[in-house]
Image (spheres, helix red, strand yellow):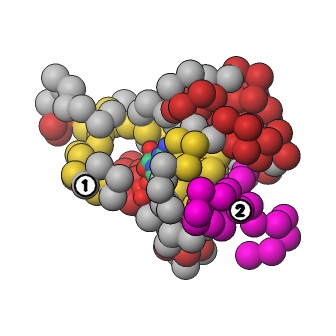
Amino acid sequence: MKALENAIVKHGKVLSDTVLKVDSFLNHQIDPELMQQIGEEFAVHFQKAGVTKILTLESSGIAPSVMAGLQLKVPVVFARKKKSLTLKDELYLAEVYSFTKKETNEISISKDYISSNDIVLIIDDFLANGQAVLGLMEITKQTGASLAGVGIVIEKGFQNGAKLIRDKNIPLKSLAIIDSLANGQITFRKEGSL
Ligand code: 5GP
């Protein structure tokens, strides 16, 4: 997605060979017009999948998910990283290991918002080693819902998350794929190549 790649080039800060900071439009300050275009791209890609719910992870997955939900006219459920006061048997839970923060978080959603009748689209801001998406897939499995696919704003194609998802035959749509952050340079994958 050209507008997203342009925003990454203009505002992205390469913190290391593996970490990209995009706080000015996605992870701290949010660019609503860009988020709207991102939502439209996801909606076009998944419009025939019969999606009934979008599932994401707080906080940075919420903005792109809400914009996609607006287009697809479906609600958005975000998994929480912090424990809520809800009783554990009222929650679906999964463990997510963060390679960036080197810690394991328990993520959860209330059993009230996704049921076995739902068709779920998982959306997240970044795909690196795939742990966040695998956690959201585990939660989806517990709900009994079916999974339409996974939508990612920025995939780091040199890490192994995308392979983990594709190996399970789950449709994956990443709006920008970065093949390298080496030497402070952002290299995008050309459209059509895998
Ligand atoms: P994964 O679970 O796929 O290893 O990592 C995905 C999660 O880690 C995303 O939800 C995102 O919050 C965070 N993350 C991973 N890599 C990056 C990165 O390069 N930049 C930023 N801003 N977040 C990242």
Residue 65 vs 20, above or below: the answer is above
Q: Position of residue 102 (x, y in %)?
A: 25, 55
Residue 78 visible here: no
Residue 127 vs 169, above or below: the answer is above
Q: Position of residue 99 (x, y in %)?
A: 33, 58
Left or right position of 191 against 94: right
Q: Is residue 47 magenta?
A: no
Residue 187 vs 145, above or below: the answer is below
| Residue 89 picture quarter | top left
Which class describes the residues within 10 Å of circle 2: few (<14), some (14-19), or many (20+)?
some
- On residue 187, the disc is 2
Indicate the amino acid at tag 1.
Lys
Residues rendered magenta in the picture = 173-194
Q: CA distance from mark 2 to mark 1?
A: 26 Å
Quadrant (top left, top right, bottom left, bottom right) of the C terminus = bottom right
Secondary structure at numbered mark 1:
loop
Q: Is residue 178 magenta?
A: yes
**Mark sitting earlier along the chain (2/1):** 1
Q: Residue at x 80, y 74 (%)?
A: 193
| Residue 42 picture quarter | top right
| Residue 24 picture quarter | top right
Q: Residue at x 67, y 35 (%)?
A: 11
**Considering depth in this image, is 101 or 69 the residue closer to the camera?**
101
Q: Position of residue 91 (x, y in %)?
A: 25, 38
Q: Position of residue 13 (x, y in %)?
A: 58, 43
Q: Which residue is mark 1?
A: 102
Indicate the amino acid at tag 2.
Thr
Residue 6 visible here: yes
- Judged from this view, the residue extending furthest toward the bottom is 167
Q: Residue at x 29, y 36 (%)?
A: 81
